[in-house]
Amino acid sequence: MDRALSVAALLDPTHQVVPFHGRESELQALTQWRDSPAAQASLLLHAPAGAGKTRLLQRFQEEHDEEHGRLLLIDDADRLTWNDIFLRLQDTLRHGPERTRVLLAARTTGWWWSSTRQRIADFDHEVTDLALEPTLADRAESFTLACQHFAKQLNVTAPDEPPPNIAQETVLDLHLAALTAVHGDPCDVNRTQLVRQLLKHDNGPKTGRIAEDHLAVATPDTPDPDLLARAAHRWPHLRPKLDELIDANPEIVLDMQRDSLRIAAEIGSFTTLDHIARQVFRDERFATCSIPSILTRRLVERAQDTLERAETYGMLSARTSLCGLREEAVEASEAEVGCYRELVEQDHENRPLLADSLGDLGLRLLAVHRTEEVLKVSEEAIQLWHEIAIDDPETVPQLASALEQISYRYQALGMPEESMDAISRATLMYQELAKDHPALFRVDFARVAATLARRHHAEGENTRAAESMQLSIANWRILAQEDPRYEPELARNLADAGSMLVELRRSEAANETLKEAVEVFRRLAVVNPQTFRAELADALMRHSRALRDLCEDPDAKLTAQEAVMLWRETEDRKGLGTALLNVVKVAHDFDAELLAAQEAVEVYRELAAENTVWHQVDLAVALATLTEQQLIHDEIDLALTTAAEVFDIVRRLPSQLVDFFGTKLAIAMQPMTSTLSEMEYHAHALEASELMVGIWRAHKDKAPASYISAVQHHACKLRGAERRVEARNTAHTAVVLWHMMGKDLDREVGYADALTIYARLCAETKFQLQKALRLTHRAVEIMRAADEPVKLEFALETVEALSSS
């Protein structure tokens, strides 16, 4: 090693001039964490600067081997933005293995870590932290070892003396003292004197913690603001200097690094706080980081009265929610509600403020899955609005809005009946308001009527769905005629209505509606292509699907290809990928479908390489589509390889992404799974089916019928794989799940299908044949009443099979 190393280089933990020693208990704790049963786990190692975090990380990495899975180290994590950490975490999803350990190190915890911790947990990581003792247990041994190695490096004789007493000592402080002693200076002094004495012997570059310490003892007139903030965190006498620097030039905060700006927000004076707030609150770059939340938390301390405190807590709740501080958002929202309760006790006129805050609290509780409390506070808000509306009819719009919001919460919590009741009441209220005050409430009625239509559609109430959507569209047309600024909303709702009509199998009505949407968007795109070209492309894709359902209209392919062309012009690769997959669905062109699927995979591979988390589901969808096309084109080896890649991605999906995108993925995997089964690749079909059941299981509260359907299909795949007893048991599970739904099953075709599948498997395994026959007779009656000839034929064949057994 170069003997001209500076003080900073000698003390640099990455150089390991003093070899790693001690920390046996900490290494043991890290080893236990590494070997824990959790598939993915993250741990924050935190301690003051100079405690030896970096050295410990290096040693742990040296002792790690591949058989324990992937290890990702993130040093100085508190100096990184969430996006920096996010990019490293998503890399673990891209390259696996399944077992992953992420070890972070930082000087502090606080809200930056709480935000990061909650976001990492969304990756299905078990997240913990470990505090590192600032100094080693055997100080004397450590001091002597440091003296020997520094003396060897400087080619001098090592001193023989005991370690000094340094207040709040860290490992690096002990090394500072050892290096001071090696230079022949007294080391039994305070930290400031140690730094001064060492720097007299050295004119080298000041880096790392030594640069902060140099700043603390030298205090130049124009220090680097980032370095000053970090130094001020450990050297309290520098805090006035930090305040002075920011006060003299407030704009400097926009050029400061995130971690130093966060420190300034935490330790600065209220004047500094005001300067930072003026710059940060209006800058979108800080919207999802913890700094605005930290500023707002400190501003609560300055609130002059209960109302101002309540308003500040409301801002704090919103800002903490944005940056992943979900638990803290709940706490702030609860404090806001508490303040408004005080104000209501003083004056009943404050009840609307309390009702609004209760609604916000319900939203925050929903984010942390505190279901019972969500319902409690949301229903209290509704009751409060009812009371307010009785006293003051002018507050009926707020009651309608509250009902709409609680409807969304009921839906998110898997309570469809309560959700439908709330949205229906809200729609009726907005309808009455729109009659009396069309200029004020027609927009709300048009919007909520469309929501009601989608709910009716989800519940299978197709006639009501169509009626509600027609009401919505009629009102949007009036709005657009009266004010052209509403034309975009008219077009968007026409597109939504057309898509719904396609699903309702009203192809001609869907075609006309989507055709009108395309015409409006074409007109808008001529005037403002940057804004409306993408929406025109989306409307064209929807229109192509409607044309496909109209007796396979040849214009479907041309319309879909026009959408692809428009997405290319917008340079929106996500839209292009979606449009290419749409071509696969509507083209009815053997070669064009395969080429479109191949290009879609290439597009999504590029996107997933940039952001694995947000695009890996898209890539899996594209790969599933390509697998089906490769099977159809008899490219069997390629298809099975592609299918294996789909399975690998799906297995590694965090539960958060399954919650967000699972339905889309499961629907996309269905054609691939069916084709694999039809071509008798039963093992692959069964693997795909198992994954789909897992996805639908995660959504069983919101989509119970889809989950049961997935279980039924899985029974069929097990049968195809000659696992008939297992298939029969799975089919029986599907029947039981139907019974648990509490519906009128005599009108449910899906239930009849489940009975038939179970009965057929009973026939094939000679199990409870008489009971199976009774169940099949019931299935036949349901199929006849529902006019389902294909399913009825299968049920009658099953009756015959059972009768002959």
Image (cartoon, helix red, strand yellow):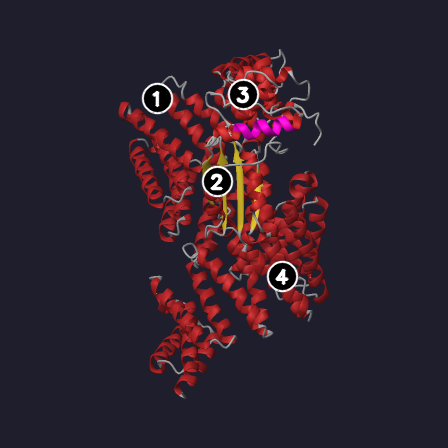
Disc 4 marks which residue? 625
The earlier-in-sequence mark between 3 and 1 is 3
Report whether residue 491 is seen.
no
The earlier-in-sequence mark between 2 and 3 is 2
Q: Is residue 261 left or right of residue 530?
A: left
The earlier-in-sequence mark between 4 and 1 is 1
Q: Is residue 343 above or below residue 449?
A: above
User: Could you give the CA–CA distance between mark 2 and mark 3, rounded to whole angstroms?
Assistant: 43 Å
The earlier-in-sequence mark between 2 and 1 is 2
Disc 1 marks which residue? 306
The secondary element bearing badge 2 is classed as: helix
Q: Is residue 210 above or below residue 640?
A: above
Disc 2 marks which residue? 24
Q: Nearer the viewer, residue 541 or 207?
A: 207
In the picture, the disc for residue 276 is 3
The earlier-in-sequence mark between 4 and 2 is 2
The secondary element bearing badge 3 is classed as: helix
